[in-house]
Image (tube, rainbow, N blue to C red):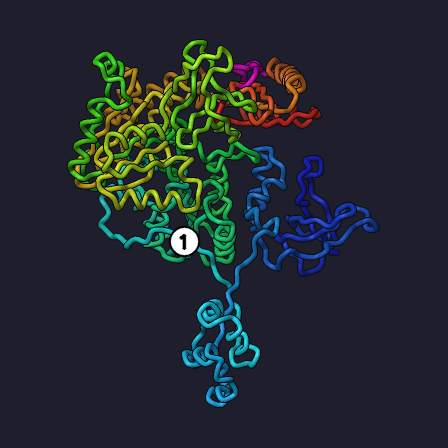
């Protein structure tokens, strides 16, 4: 007897287990199938085929049929599912859903076919023409342009000569129809293939990565030619008959990356990210599955691509927190990349101009192999960073958001017909509206966060749930009309720039301006083609972009990320500003960076100004060691959410008592334990509580396992519980 182990595709945690079904010879591991489940027939995933079962044979049900003929989940991904289930404590069905496009699961998208027609070579056209009425002008004209042996799009002919004329020729067997699948390919900016000699440092980096199947930290300054290293390594792997995965942190980076890769590798490249249409994503995924694409480029989810025989995995800007999924299912794409690296016995390249503290520490300890590119490929120096004290500007009578130095540099940029990029780590017009009489700040009714003022829409918006509110004209608390704006956002910066430079093209790139399809590409293309021009944006403009004529970078308010309630705030500030600074002076023209701050003597800015990552790393590592923060410990968070504050609070207390008991039995492993309301106490009407703990690295895995056991053994009562290891967002 042939038995299929099936995971049913149903959203109930209590039945997240493997079921046995009898199956025919045509059922394969990795297929999607229809199976009877209770009184209904539902979809499931076949994860194994075996010869026997412990189930009662009289009650054993049979697989109804397969959803599609081909295998859609590779054996490698089934093994990955088991690893992720153990590592991240996820439901098996949630992991399996990551492996295929969501539209495919719900049958919302299918292959697109195009109909072609051609002349039947057995037809005597002259004789047939005699049978056509003289007033059938479309038919006669159509016959006059048709050539034997040539195919024509039926849709195109119908549009030009009428559907009835084409259909009549089909009915009379003059035209023979055939169908062909039409691929919905993502659009990209075409560029010419660029070839140049590798620098000695690039060549050494390429040779080092190709020498072994280790994990490498590629530490290269902005403009050092990391992308060329990626492509050269991939090129060699493709020559060896292997494939490659290339991850980028932002969708905004994919147009440029895709253009470079398409110019080099053509149709061997497929792209996967959330900005594609459902049809494009489906077709790209099928190209990968069928082996038509050898290289996958994409954001976090591309690590699950069904690509076989992986020869190298590259994670660009490895320090980015966007590689960590903070929604269900929670996972770290770099951890998944490590699994696929080990499974395929291939190199894994983690690359950045500003490696995370954790990654650089692993490189120094020998866990990763360090490969450095300390110089720009063109030999040009890094752009000079000038720190401007905004308190001094205010004392000298300048109360605008732009320092005199930044104004001067922007004027020079305009006169020289160059480009500038201005970084503001906040979208909207203003971060909040405040009553200056009583201090009231407008907040979302469903989330415990302040509302952001969007001037163009004349709305207050919640950036967590998306809810919109009317603009305040008077304070609801005291009735005062003294309503003032808070810290500036991208929209306000653009507004002021347009006042100052009415004849300059000013573009904005943030989550508000990039919601539509191809918006990233359109903004970046327009910016690249326009001089002079200013591009204002959030962190999506801070990395990866390469524009030869950008000579000025302005950091409008460097302090925005510095004082977040996160032990990594200084590290993130260093990363953001260094990455942003690297956008200037990448070609012949020298670059200049104006860093505006209210705390010019902060140690982070001193290291930033000198591009001194290693000294910053030593300083930050010593602070982390003294305060027992990662990488010397691991942070574990139990996050509780629900509708009722009382129920969520009581559940939190119950779990806290169990974790405290665990701590008392393992005091040597615990550094910190506490239960509290989350800093953001409500999101989308869901109340949020958390238990935070810091565990010594040495015995952390054992403690994590015991935490999971506690979570499994307590029945959750109307509360959702998430276990997060080293969460990137502690709010």
Q: Where is residue 604 in the image (x, y as percent from the top left)?
A: 31, 20
Where 727 falls versus 478 (above or below)?
below
Number of numbered discs overlaid on the protein picture = 1
Give the magenta range. Answer: 666-678
| Residue 280 relative to residue 93: left or right | left
| Residue 218 relative to residue 419: left or right | right
Residue 701 falls in image quadrant: top right
Q: Which residue is drawn at 58% across and 24% down?
A: 639
- From this viewpoint, is residue 449 visible? yes
Magenta portion: prevailing SS class: strand
Label 1 element class = strand
Q: Residue at x 49, y 26 (%)?
A: 470
Residue 429 falls in image quadrant: top left
Residue 219 falls in image quadrant: top left
Residue under label 1: 269
Query: Can residue 525 be found in the magenta stretch?
Result: no
Q: Position of residue 54 (x, y in %)?
A: 77, 45
Q: Where is residue 413 in the image (x, y as percent from the top left)?
A: 19, 34
Q: Crowdedness of circle 1 by 10 Å Cα count: few (<14), some, many (20+)?
A: many
498 or 363: which is nearer to us? 498
In the rendered view of the protein, which quadrant contains the N terminus? bottom right
- From this viewpoint, is residue 217 visible? no
641 or 128: which is nearer to us? 128
Q: Which residue is drawn at 41% across and 14% down?
A: 482
| Residue 568 relative to residue 220: left or right | right
Where 109 falls versus 179 (above or below)?
above
Where 633 falls versus 246 (above or below)?
above
Query: Can residue 670 be found in the magenta stretch?
Result: yes
212 or 191: which is nearer to us? 191
377 or 122: which is nearer to us? 122
């Amino acid at each position: 007897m042939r038995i299929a182990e099936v995971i049913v595709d149903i959203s109930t945690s209590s039945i997240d287990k493997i079921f046995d079904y009898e199956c025919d010879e045509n059922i394969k591991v990795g297929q999607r199938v229809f199976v009877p489940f209770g009184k209904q027939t539902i979809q499931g995933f076949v994860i194994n085929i075996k010869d026997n079962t412990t189930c009662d044979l009289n009650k054993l049900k049979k697989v109804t049929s397969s959803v599609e003929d081909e295998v859609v989940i590779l054996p490698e991904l089934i093994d990955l599912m088991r690893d992720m289930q153990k590592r991240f404590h996820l439901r098996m069905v949630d992991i399996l859903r990551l492996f295929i496009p969501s539209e495919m699961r719900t049958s919302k998208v299918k292959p697109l076919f195009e109909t072609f027609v051609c002349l039947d070579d057995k037809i005597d056209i002259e004789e047939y023409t005699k049978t056509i009425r003289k007033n059938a002008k479309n038919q006669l004209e159509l016959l006059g342009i048709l050539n034997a042996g040539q195919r024509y799009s039926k849709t195109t002919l119908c549009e030009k000569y009428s559907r009835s004329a084409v259909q009549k020729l089909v009915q009379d067997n003059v035209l023979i129809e055939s169908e062909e699948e039409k691929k919905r390919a993502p659009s990209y900016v075409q560029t010419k293939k660029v070839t140049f000699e590798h620098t000695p440092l690039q060549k050494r980096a390429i040779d080092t990565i190709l020498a072994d199947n280790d994990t490498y930290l590629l530490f290269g300054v902005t403009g050092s030619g990391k992308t060329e290293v990626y492509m050269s390594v991939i090129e060699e792997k493709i020559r060896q008959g292997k494939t490659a995965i290339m991850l980028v942190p932002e969708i905004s980076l994919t147009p440029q990356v895709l253009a470079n890769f398409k110019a080099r590798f053509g149709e061997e490249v497929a792209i996967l990210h959330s900005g594609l249409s459902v049809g494009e994503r489906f077709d790209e995924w099928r190209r990968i599955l069928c082996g038509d694409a050898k290289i996958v480029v994409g954001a976090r989810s591309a690590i699950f691509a069904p690509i076989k025989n992986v020869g190298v995995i590259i994670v660009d800007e490895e320090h980015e927190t966007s590689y960590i999924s903070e929604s269900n299912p929670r996972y770290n794409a770099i951890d998944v990349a490590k699994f696929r690296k080990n499974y395929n016995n291939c190199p894994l390249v983690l690359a950045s101009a500003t490696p995370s503290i954790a990654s650089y520490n692993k490189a120094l300890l020998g866990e990763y192999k360090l490969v450095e590119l300390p110089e720009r490929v063109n030999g040009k120096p890094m752009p000079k960073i000038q720190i401007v004290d905004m308190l001094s500007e205010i004392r000298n009578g300048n109360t605008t958001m732009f320092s005199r130095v930044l104004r001067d540099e922007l004027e020079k940029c305009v006169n020289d017909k160059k480009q500038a990029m201005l970084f503001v780590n906040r979208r909207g017009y203003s971060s909040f509206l405040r009553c200056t009489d009583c201090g009231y700040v407008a907040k979302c009714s469903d989330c415990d966060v302040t509302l952001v003022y969007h001037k163009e829409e004349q709305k207050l918006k919640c950036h967590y749930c998306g809810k919109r509110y009317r603009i305040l004209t008077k304070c609801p608390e005291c009735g005062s009309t003294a309503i003032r704006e808070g810290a500036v956002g991208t929209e306000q910066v653009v507004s002021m720039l347009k006042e100052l430079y009415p004849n300059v093209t000013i573009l904005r790139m943030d989550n508000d301006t990039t919601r539509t399809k191809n918006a990233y590409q359109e903004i970046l293309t327009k910016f690249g083609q326009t001089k002079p021009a200013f591009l204002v944006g959030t962190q999506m403009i801070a990395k990866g972009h390469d524009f030869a004529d950008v000579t000025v970078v302005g950091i409008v308010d460097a302090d925005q990320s510095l004082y977040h309630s996160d032990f990594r705030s200084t590290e993130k500030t260093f990363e953001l500003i260094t990455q942003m600074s690297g956008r200037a002076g990448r070609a012949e023209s020298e670059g200049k960076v104006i860093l505006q701050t209210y705390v010019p003597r902060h140690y982070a800015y001193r290291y930033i100004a000198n591009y001194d990552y290693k000294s910053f790393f030593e300083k930050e590592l010593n602070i982390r060691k003294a305060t027992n923060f990662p990488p010397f410990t691991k942070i574990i968070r139990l996050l509780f959410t629900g509708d009722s504050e009382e129920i969520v609070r009581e559940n939190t207390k119950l779990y806290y008592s169990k974790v405290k008991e665990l701590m008392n039995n393992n005091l040597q492993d615990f550094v910190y334990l506490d239960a509290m309301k989350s800093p953001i106490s409500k999101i989308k009407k869901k109340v949020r509580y958390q238990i935070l703990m810091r565990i010594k690295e040495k015995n952390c895995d054992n403690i994590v396992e015991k935490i999971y056991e506690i979570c499994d053994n307590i029945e959750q009562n109307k509360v959702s519980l998430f276990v997060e290891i080293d969460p990137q967002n502690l709010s």
